[in-house]
Image (cartoon, helix red, strand yellow):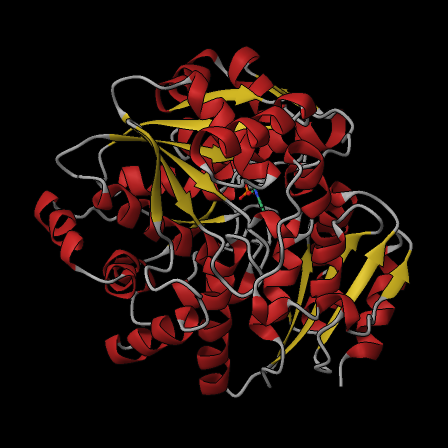
Amino acid sequence: MKYVSTRGEAPELTFEQAMLTGLARDGGLYVPEVFPTLTHKQIESFSAKSYEEVAFEVMKPFIGDTFSDEEFKIIIKSAYAGFSHSAKCPVVQLAENHFLLELFHGPTLAFKDVAMQLIGQMFQVSLKRRGERVTIVGATSGDTGSAAMDAFKGLDSVDLFIMYPHGRVSEVQRRQMTTPTEANVHALAVDGDFDTCQALLKDMFNDFNFRDEVKLAGVNSINWARVLAQVVYYFTSAVSIGAPKRKVSFTVPTGNFGDIFAGYVAKKMGLPIDRLVIATNHNDILHRTLETGEHTKSGVTPSISPSMDIQVSSNFERLVFDLYDRQGLMVAQLFDELKSDGSFKLSENALDRLGNEFDSGRCSEDETSSAIKAYLEKTGEVLCPHSAIGVKVADEHLNNTAMITLATAHPAKFPDAVKKACGIHPSLPPQMADLFERDERMTRVSCDLAAIEEIIRKGIK
Ligand SMILES: *Cc1c(COP(=O)(O)O)cnc(C)c1O
């Protein structure tokens, strides 16, 4: 399987190269040359299989000969060994036709663990074999950073630096990033919002001298391997409620468009998905794009769902690539416009295609809190604010097709917002109970690329 850039001018790569590289050198994102498909029968057989077995079958066609079957099975097994639920990503029923996919049973309590734990193992096996060491730099709105810290801490082929927006992540998120004691992981608190962090990261990848000097690698949701890991739970959850015989829809609390793009990939692979519903908070660039065809940045306003406080939705480029029949130069032009003018307009044809696959809805702060309260009363589930946005928007799109809403984080990651909304203070699971007593370690940095690059040079042993 070859991987091509969405901007059409970077060399084609293998899975292993795309995984280790992250961003393409033409500024684009890597996507598979074609989407492999699974047969109806194969999907049907998943109902008798474990999460790990389905993961192997779903991801196998994408990885080429990067890992042997035996190697890949061990990687998958170790990745999910630290999950606290035996189903890994269990589904619970909320109403007759509405289900919740719980993605927060990993070590840092958000869905980011599903991909990051796998990527940690894949990097380790691949780099060991190559005798190489890399520097991973990531930007996070909170959950990616903590998930990466947990997945990479102590690995001997990797130094990890995570940039997060200072003062804009929850205390649990911050502590998950600043309390690991392993010397190879570093938290950088940036003066700015998540989009600032993400822009710094993009600029760092485009500084080719620095990129080569420190052997820069990325694990942000632009990394194809992350999207791939997330495709798996669309299959396991849909099959658990009756697919492929029964059609399903999904509602996905969305920021960077990585998680919901994985749903689009699952559909391309043959999973009978009817609608994919984008749920946003008041940072609603994606919702506005669906309504008007105009993809226009506005400022980021902090919310009680901070992991979705994003206006530069990086993975959306992967979808735009398909909406424009995979013409990389068209995509490059649109995203250049976005960079220079803060906006681009989709063609009528592209907008039609977008509407054929996706719906969207937006949820205000008050609506988010009300949904947390209402769902506690109705179902006994305590939802995190992101998941609450999901169920609220899903409710607006319910019809005869079964709906699965993705619960992207554990409520204990956002205790203040949850307490305020429903009166219950969700407690951390036992393995994390002493989080607030651990010592914190981080470096404050301003939004200055050269200064941050210098800190990274000095931090690499
Ligand atoms: C990252 C995250 C999201 C958004 O996911 P994207 O892949 O960026 O769309 C939603 N909820 C939580 C809790 C997250 O951590």
Residue 255 in view of the camera: no
Point out residue 161 in the picture as x, y percentages from the top left corner.
72, 67
257 or 50: nearer the eye? Answer: 50
446 or 259: nearer the eye? Answer: 259
- The number of numbered badges drawn on the structure is 0
Say which quadrant the C terminus sits in: bottom right
Looking at the image, is 354 positioned above or below residue 137? above
Q: Quadrant of residue 433?
A: bottom right
Q: Is residue 402 left or right of residue 461?
A: left
Say which quadrant the N terminus sits in: bottom left
Q: What residue is at 82 percent from the left and 70 percent from the top?
A: 440
Looking at the image, is 451 positioned above or below residue 459? above
Q: Is residue 268 left or right of residue 214?
A: left
Q: Quadrant of residue 299?
A: top right
Point out residue 124 in the picture as x, y percentages from the top left corner.
50, 79
Q: Quadrant of residue 40?
A: top left
Q: What residue is at 34 percent from the left and 46 percent from the top?
A: 91
Residue 77 in view of the camera: yes
Seen as rendered, the residue at the extreme left is 41
Looking at the image, is 193 positioned above or below residue 322? below
Q: Quadrant of ligand 1?
A: top right
Point out residue 119 in the picture as x, y percentages from the top left corner.
48, 67
Point out residue 413 in the picture as x, y percentages from the top left corner.
64, 52
Q: What residue is at 73 percent from the left and 33 percent from the top?
A: 303
